[in-house]
Image: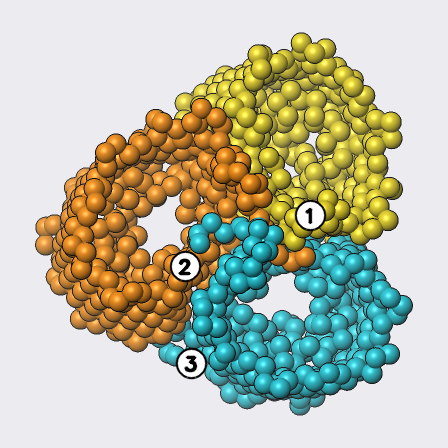
Chain colours: A orange, B cyan, C yellow
């Protein structure tokens, strides 16, 4: 028999039994065509993902009684275009998420590698969800910012009338404790159409810099459309030479349902580096057509224009496209399937 | 549905529900003893596979209604002898197959990395299925030919009275669009005991060469035995220096059931490189004993003799065996288990 | 419940059918805090595991009839702290176990990569199960000893009135057959509270050495406590320069249940290198608190003191901690969750 995997849980008649023991295999496969035009025009298949970043994961929950649960999550990211892990460039590692923890009335505590509460609290106000060619560059690896921490302890509070907070401490695992250390906090408030979030984090020795970030955002869902806005500021302090500079992003977005199955998205991002380090503006426009809850077709256009020496490229731009007079255009059309 | 390991049994009440959502974990573990004798005699365990190449995969289908389905497939190859991926030499990557797509009345469209339609149309006429020590070298990596393409769009037609066609276009993802680009076509006809297939493909810049291949084959199943034959020709054109040469293969094979659970296989391959580049002859003999539909024991012997400077080695020959006066013997005995 | 994923059709009502075909996804996620104090004090998250080494695996059994079964097992190890495989340092490979085999009345035969029978027969008398900061260093990679072999054939006998034997032969897969070759034997006896085990193995060319090992151990469970003892000796013979030395370990341990869910463990290890190569003593103390059959919290303290030039570090010590006057302290507190 080839059809092979089953949640044990499922087998039992009772929901209690289901809670007691389940392992879930899940994932997202998302790719399509990407066209990047800067100094050169390059076509190809989307690597990380256009609508939702591709992934394969295993997660489970065990009910320990008295409201206590044990949880785990192992999640790898792979480019569907060539089958390799987009973190390692080769074999699949659990570099998206790798955690074990406990959860109960007190909230949840997890150990391992995870997206930070600080990142999660603010990045959700990017209309493109920090994904694909239209995504904001506020949190992009080009800027040195890291959305994940590892060797870390994470705490997430329970939902208190819409408020949640979370914090991570990432051990540097160095002889000098401050090297590579991470600390961050995130707080969110969700109440019907209204949503706020703010985060603060400090990451030591990313390259030769200490990065200190604060960011906040909010959204309001009017029904016909949802408006989103955020501001992010990261300070880079050179730990060897001294001196520092700041990278600031201001983002505005809107998403709106179209018919029963469609959604349009648009966003504007303004980037600025302190002390005349340059600035850039990005506009993005996208459409998502849901074929089901799990599967969607999408198309996105984005355009960035750098000034005064800044040289940001769009998220997921094809290698070799580069910039032409500081400008780059990007187009993505693809399919996202979740399982 | 995001929670995905689903008890088919659970769905078993309705075929429709079953079709709506299933994720399958599947694989093949195949290894055994390999003995190679050329300049040296080397013994060891089979790495890639003797009867069917080892693999671990995840695949799924979602019914989107109106005859439309979303599909995905992620498949890695690992050597059971040491647990490593035989593409990366280390961690597991989805280098056998990595696709997401849609299928319906129009056929199927898939994006990602996959075996090419051209390869599939012709390689099935090797009595050893292009696998193990007895497999033909027509499509072997020694020849530079690549059975897979990536960063690719694939189309497969529906079955039209036994006819099917398929095509792939692999984006080079280079500044100069022709670099590393792939295009290929395959067509097959299957009608009861009769089967034909033909393929054409062009792969740019494999090393410094453009490879242009055409190949065709056919088979007829007489019941007591099935006869198979194919011809393949690849032209290697040096894109820098100019000039070209051709690698030609002619293959003949027979398979025959023995008793209720057995099958014997034999094949002859003739290889020739144009302009006095040498030639070689290979004969292979094998027996497969099925313990069940999923599990088999097998034994294979193969012998290759090169002339005039050609230096082909058997598929899956132990490293270090080499050739003695252009000759190599190979023996494999192993177990194949599919799950 | 440990068996988490079940073959679908399998569920179909009959136990016999269930036996016919099952694939199980299973694993262990184990991490926590590790503190190492030697020349430096270093804090961080446990990588390989503190109570049980972390892993993700797939295994299955197929009933072939007449008491014969086909089996397979693919198992990778990953550090939960950063999501990478602790064998490759990157993507997940099946380096813990990778086997396919047959089992029946004759015992079981497996091909691939596996823990050796020799190792398994003796290492089980370490009260800490050769795991975590408190584990014995008798079989540690620091000593060059390898608990696994690959390119190997393994045989395990059926249980004969409590007696079992196992043997592995690992092909060197080299032109000169003795290079990298492995051969080993293990025998165990288990009868109620009483348990014995002994192993012998020879591994050629680990680095420049041939390693010949014999080790034996025993345990008796008095109910209120279980006593364990073992002795191991490995001889390292330099195959190029000649000459040899021995590494000897003597270990004593005790484990005792505490209440309904707890267990205390303590062990003493004495290490000695022949010809005045130095010696060391290690004491370990641990407590395990089971939250369920699958999930436990644990704490372990260990201390090692080297003399006369030996420089052993504790198992899983944080990188950079080093030794201070030959001494190192280690503390681990963590969670282990099996699925």
Vertical side of A242 occupied by C289: above or below: above
* CA separation in Å, label 1 and label 3: 57 Å
Mark closer to the observer (2, 3)? 2
Q: Disc 2 sits on a residue from what chain?
A: A
Residue B244: image quadrant is: bottom right
In the picture, the quarter occupied by the C terminus of chain C is top right
Structural distance between the alpha carbons of marks 2 and 3:
35 Å
Residue at image location 76% in from the left, 57% down from the top:
B295
Residue that numbered label 2 is attached to: A294
Using the numbered discs, state the Cα–Cα distance from disc 1 to disc 2 in whole angstroms: 31 Å
Query: Dot 2: what SS?
Result: loop
Instruction: Using the image, name the chain to which the residue with label 3 belongs.
Output: B
Who is closer to the viewer here, C243 or A234?
A234
Q: Of discs 1 and 3, which sits in the foreground?
A: 1
Residue at position x 47%, y 23% in the image: C333
Q: Numbered disc 1: what chain? A: C
Bin the neighbour count of mark 1 within 10 Å (Cα to Cα): few under 14, some 14-19, many 20 and up.
Answer: few
Image coordinates of residue B101 in percent, x first then y, are: 46, 69
Q: Secondary structure at mark 1?
A: loop
* Nearer-the-camera pick, C113 or C68: C68
In the foreground, A50 or A103: A103
Q: Position of residue A286 (x, y in %)?
A: 25, 66
Identify residue for label 3.
Answer: B178
Quadrant (top left, top right, bottom left, bottom right) of the N terminus of chain C: top right
In the picture of the structure, the residue carrying the numbered disc 1 is: C13
Q: How many marks on residues?
A: 3
Q: Residue at x 52, y 43 (%)?
A: A23
Marks 2 and 3 on same chain: no
Q: Position of residue A71 (x, y in %)?
A: 46, 35
Tag in front: 1 or 2 = 1
The picture quadrant where one finds residue C294 is top right
* In the depicted structure, whether residue A104 falls above or below residue B131: above
């Amino acid at each position: 028999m080839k059809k092979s995997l089953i949640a044990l849980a499922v087998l039992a008649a009772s929901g209690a039994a289901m809670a007691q023991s389940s392992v879930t295999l899940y994932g997202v496969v998302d790719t399509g065509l990407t066209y990047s035009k800067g100094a050169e025009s390059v076509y190809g298949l989307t690597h990380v993902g256009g609508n939702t970043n591709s992934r394969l994961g295993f997660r489970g929950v065990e009910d320990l009684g008295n409201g206590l649960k044990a949880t785990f999550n192992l999640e790898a990211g792979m480019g569907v275009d060539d089958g390799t892990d987009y973190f390692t460039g080769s074999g699949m590692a659990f570099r998206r998420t790798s955690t074990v923890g406990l959860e109960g009335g007190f909230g949840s505590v997890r150990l391992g590698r995870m997206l930070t509460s600080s990142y999660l609290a603010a990045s959700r106000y990017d209309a493109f969800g920090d994904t694909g060619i239209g995504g904001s560059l506020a949190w992009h690896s080009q800027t040195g910012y890291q959305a994940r921490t590892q060797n870390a302890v994470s705490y997430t509070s329970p939902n208190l009338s819409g408020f949640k907070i979370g914090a991570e401490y990432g051990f540097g695992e160095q002889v000098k404790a401050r090297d590579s250390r991470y600390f961050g906090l995130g707080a969110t408030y969700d109440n019907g159409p209204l949503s706020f979030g703010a985060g603060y984090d400090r990451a030591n020795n990313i390259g030769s810099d200490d990065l200190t970030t604060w960011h906040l955002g909010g959204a309001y869902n009017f029904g016909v459309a949802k408006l989103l806005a955020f501001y992010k500021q990261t300070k880079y302090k050179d730990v060897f030479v001294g001196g520092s500079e700041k990278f600031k992003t201001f983002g505005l977005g809107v998403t709106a349902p179209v018919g029963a199955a469609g959604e349009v998205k648009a966003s504007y991002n303004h980037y600025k580096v302190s002390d005349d380090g340059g600035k850039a503006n990005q506009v993005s426009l996208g459409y998502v057509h849901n074929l089901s809850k799990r599967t969607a077709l999408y198309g996105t256009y984005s355009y960035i224009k750098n000034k005064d020496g800044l040289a940001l490229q769009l998220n997921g731009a094809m290698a070799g496209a580069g910039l032409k007079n500081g400008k780059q255009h990007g187009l993505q059309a693809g399919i996202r399937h979740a399982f």
